[in-house]
């Protein structure tokens, strides 16, 4: 069973890597320390992918949302909100499991051996509500209301929290540009400290950033219960062995709720089920349980 | 009993509403703000600004 599970994991990592490469295919950017400036950057990618990453060929949706909300001319981002609704309603947090480069990085970090891996802890699920607070405060309210004299708001989540921006954009650009190296200060140090904490925690806990911090995961989690792509449990086949709950690294019990907001649709439960009671479906008339 | 709001039919309707919202956002010029932000190095994002 372990072998099957691992095979599935590496297949998924292959898709994640391919997607990350496709959406960061401006490889010359990594050589010259520049970013892609073409028209594709009108478009958002579904996952968290800093648009200041030298390889990025499209825009980060969380950065894009803050940019529009913080713009003196708009204050609400119909384009990005519509994008979230479209992607979320179709596939929900499948994005987190399969199409997010920062999710892949955390997945790989968690494979590093550590004597005491932490699967869950007291207050784990309560702490997961933090990402909704971060979404509301740092992505929406602060860019909307904490504005300068021109009425422009800063991207507070990117500026103060996002470790993906530091890893994908900050580190390569600063390493490749002498002029940028000369301008780094306390903010750069703060963001690198956050990145270091995220890396260490990712070795011990499975996807800590996705579970507790990520505003994009918070958005997509709201759509998980209604998304067109979904999981389904066949109660007639289910023998109640609990293997699905045991293998879930997001600590979801698919038998209780096959489309839980915390499910990233990695497919581990589906693969592990000894009686194949868990399936995926796209049908509009489907229900979460067959009984 | 399944709650109507949690049915995938709702998902299809929300996806359609999302496309319409994206269209409205593009119509009122939000895409140019996204482009302007994305084609320049975001100093805040990388921890400099």
Image (cartoon, rainbow, N blue to C red):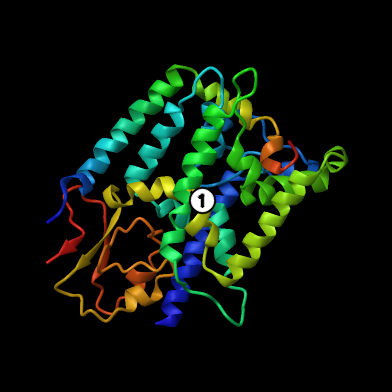
Residue A4, image x and y in percent? 42, 77
Q: Is residue B24 left or right of residue A30?
A: left
| Residue drawn where x is 43% and y is 49% of the image | A218
* Vertical position of residue A213 compared to residue A147: above or below: below
Q: Is residue A34 left or right of residue A218?
A: right
Q: Is residue A235 left or right of residue A100?
A: left
Q: Quadrant of the C terminus of chain B?
A: top right
Label 1: chain letter = A
| Residue drawn where x is 46% and y is 60% of the image | A127
Residue A163, image x and y in percent? 64, 51
Residue A90, image x and y in percent? 33, 45
* Residue A172 in sight from this viewpoint: no
- The residue to which callout 1 is attached is A214
Count up the numbered dots.
1
* Vertical position of residue B30 compared to residue A272: above or below: above
Please tell me which residue lies in front, A181 or A268. A181
Q: Quadrant of the N terminus of chain B?
A: bottom left
| Residue drawn where x is 31% and y is 37% of the image | B15
Task: Give the class, few, some or many, for how many residues have Cα within 10 Å of label 1's Cα (few <14, many ≥20).
Answer: many
* Vertical position of residue A269 compared to residue A224: above or below: below
* Residue A227 in sight from this viewpoint: yes
Residue A29, image x and y in percent? 73, 41
Q: Would you identify the image quadrant in which residue A196 lies?
A: bottom right
* Vertical position of residue A262 compared to residue B5: above or below: below
Q: Would you identify the image quadrant in which residue B12 lies?
A: top left
Q: Secondary structure at mark 1?
A: loop
| Residue drawn where x is 26% and y is 73% of the image | A276
């Amino acid at each position: 069973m372990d072998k099957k599970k691992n095979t599935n994991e590496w297949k998924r990592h292959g898709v994640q890597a391919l997607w990350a490469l496709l959406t960061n295919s401006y490889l010359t950017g990594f050589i010259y320390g520049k970013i892609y400036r073409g028209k594709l950057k009108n478009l958002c990618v579904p996952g968290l992918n800093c648009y200041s990453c030298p390889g990025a060929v499209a825009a980060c949706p969380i950065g894009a949302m803050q940019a529009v909300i913080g713009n003196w001319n708009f204050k609400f981002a119909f384009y990005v909100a519509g994008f979230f609704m479209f992607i979320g309603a179709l596939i929900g947090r499948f994005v987190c499991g399969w199409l997010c480069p920062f999710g892949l990085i955390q997945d790989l970090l968690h494979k590093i051996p550590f004597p005491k891996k932490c699967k869950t802890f007291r207050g784990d699920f309560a702490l997961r509500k933090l990402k909704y607070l971060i979404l509301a405060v740092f992505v929406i309210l602060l860019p909307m209301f904490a504005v300068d004299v021109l009425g422009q708001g800063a991207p507070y989540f990117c500026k103060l929290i996002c470790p993906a921006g530091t890893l994908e954009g900050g580190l390569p650009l600063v390493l490749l540009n002498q002029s940028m190296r000369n301008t780094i200060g306390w903010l750069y140090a703060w963001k690198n400290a956050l990145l270091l904490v995220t890396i260490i925690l990712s070795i011990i806990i499975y996807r800590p950033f996705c579970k507790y911090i990520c505003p994009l995961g918070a958005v997509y989690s709201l759509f998980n219960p209604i998304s067109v792509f979904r999981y389904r449990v066949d109660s007639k086949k289910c023998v109640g062995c609990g293997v699905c709950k045991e293998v879930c690294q997001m600590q979801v019990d698919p038998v209780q709720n096959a489309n839980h907001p915390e499910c990233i649709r990695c497919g581990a439960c589906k693969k592990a089920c000894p009686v194949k009671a868990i399936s995926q479906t796209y049908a509009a008339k489907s229900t979460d349980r067959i009984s | 009993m399944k709650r109507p709001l949690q049915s995938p039919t709702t998902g299809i309707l929300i996806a359609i509403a999302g496309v319409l919202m994206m269209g409205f956002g593009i119509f009122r010029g939000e895409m140019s703000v996204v482009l302007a932000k994305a084609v320049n190095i975001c100093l805040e994002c990388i921890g400099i600004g």
